[in-house]
Image (cartoon, rainbow, N blue to C red):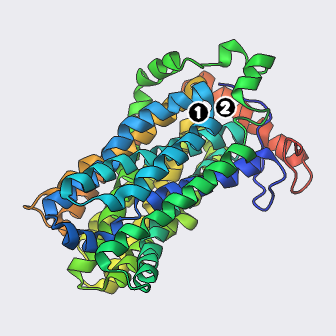
Amino acid sequence: MEIKNKAPRINLFSLRTVQMRTFHLTWLAFFLCFFGWFGIAPLMPLVRDDLGLTKGEIGNTIIASVAITVLVRLLIGPLCDKIGPRKTYTALLVIGSLPVMLIGLADSYETFLLARLAIGSIGASFVITQYHTSTMFAPNVVGTANATTAGWGNLGGGVTQMVMPLILAMVLGFGVSETMGWRLAMVFPGVIMLVVAVLYWFFTTDAPDGNYADMRKSGALSPEDDHAGATKGMLAAAKDYRVWALFLVYGACFGVELTINNIAAIYFFDRFELSLQTAGLIAGLFGLMNIFARTLGGVFSDKFAAKGGLSGRVKFLFLALFIEGVALVAFSMMDALVIAVSMMVVFSLFVQMSEGATFGIVPFVNRKALGSVAGIVGAGGNAGAVAAGFLFKSEALTYQQGLMYLGIAVIVCSFAALAVRFSEKTVAEEKERFEKAMQERDALPSGAQAVPAE
């Protein structure tokens, strides 16, 4: 749908406008969802011993943690179109916090599997994050805005690898057993999610001009631009081959990141015989690259667009994804700890740049069905993680072999990016929007936004 008064500039150190309040709350909400989503991953060695899990059963829990998100992401995009991202995100944070806090009640493989399945629903937060920033920022900076909010949110996957073992150590410091410790530690991320849900409700709006419900009543959101029923938008997105090409592409980058978040700690713990804290610290480096790596993907996408239009965005996406695959294959072949960690960092850089570049394209595929497009493409990330999960479930393959095969698959999938094409009409329209946004940005005083404070 067409949204007016989008901000043509990102002023990181301001909360004065609704655009920047939304910017910071979207990445914070996604960060905490990611933290809760993978909070159990660095504690898996303890869970494995406590519940007596086999490698196959651990693989099933990994698949469960990302499988349900495929369905929820498909539903959450159209829901954003219907009721708005503000209500959708608040509800997801509240409902999602419950299984995060209650996973400690698991006392068997089956109950633990169900808990991880339920927690996986909060992975749909990504779609809302990308949707909400897309409604708030103009074409000249939307790639950067989407990439930064998603990247800083994904950072939760790295921080949780480092912080959860420390939270566990703090809990154990009170004399609690390890069996009870990992259970109590998971209460922490759930409680923080509830706090952010309250902030999101009170300090954001669906669009720069207000909430969808009010805009529909006032006529600010015209019927021809409004897919409140979402069915029309979902059908339009589902019929577009470019959406499915990006679905595959996103599976090859975000799906890979989810997989590494799930296995990195236990991989370094087992392969290099490290302590739980050290393995978690190293695994956390992968996610910590999100501080800047995904943002770089969005920045380069915007810069390539300034010179080459929409085709420039596509070419950069292909390049980043291809290099990601090559780096992953190289990482899988490393036997020395220092070299393995170094290669993991390089690999992480291009994984996250590819993610940023993917959602530097998504807002332009179908403006009137943004939620549906974002939902389908976002679901591709989890579908990729589900597929990759089977590589690491198999008793016949080592983790190293699984990583190598995964890298080869990424290289193959990178060519799907080149299938994303735009009509001459769309290219011309988006070029006009881009240039207009640049003119608006240059006309603004330093630090100002397009819309004054409320």
Q: Which residue type carries mark 2?
A: Glu
Name the residue beneath numbered marker 2.
430
Quadrant showing the C terminus: top right
How far from the left and from the top, in percent, is residue 8? 78, 44
Q: Which mark is residue 364?
A: 1
Label 2: how many Cα within 10 Å (few below 14, some 14–19, many 20+):
some
Give the mark, 1 or 2, whose residue is nearer the N terminus.
Answer: 1
How far from the left and from the top, in percent, is residue 192? 57, 60
Out of 231 and 35, give the one closest to the viewer. 35
Q: Residue at x 29, y 69 (%)?
A: 44
Can see residue 421?
A: no
How far from the left and from the top, in percent, is residue 156? 50, 63
Left or right for 311, reference 408: right
Tags 1 and 2 in contact by the CB under 8 Å rule? yes
Left or right for 393, reference 435: left
How far is disc 1 from disc 2 in space, using C-alphas?
Answer: 8 Å
Can see residue 2?
A: yes
Out of 449 and 70, give the one closest to the viewer. 70
Q: Which mark is residue 300?
A: none
Q: Residue at x 66, y 18 (%)?
A: 225
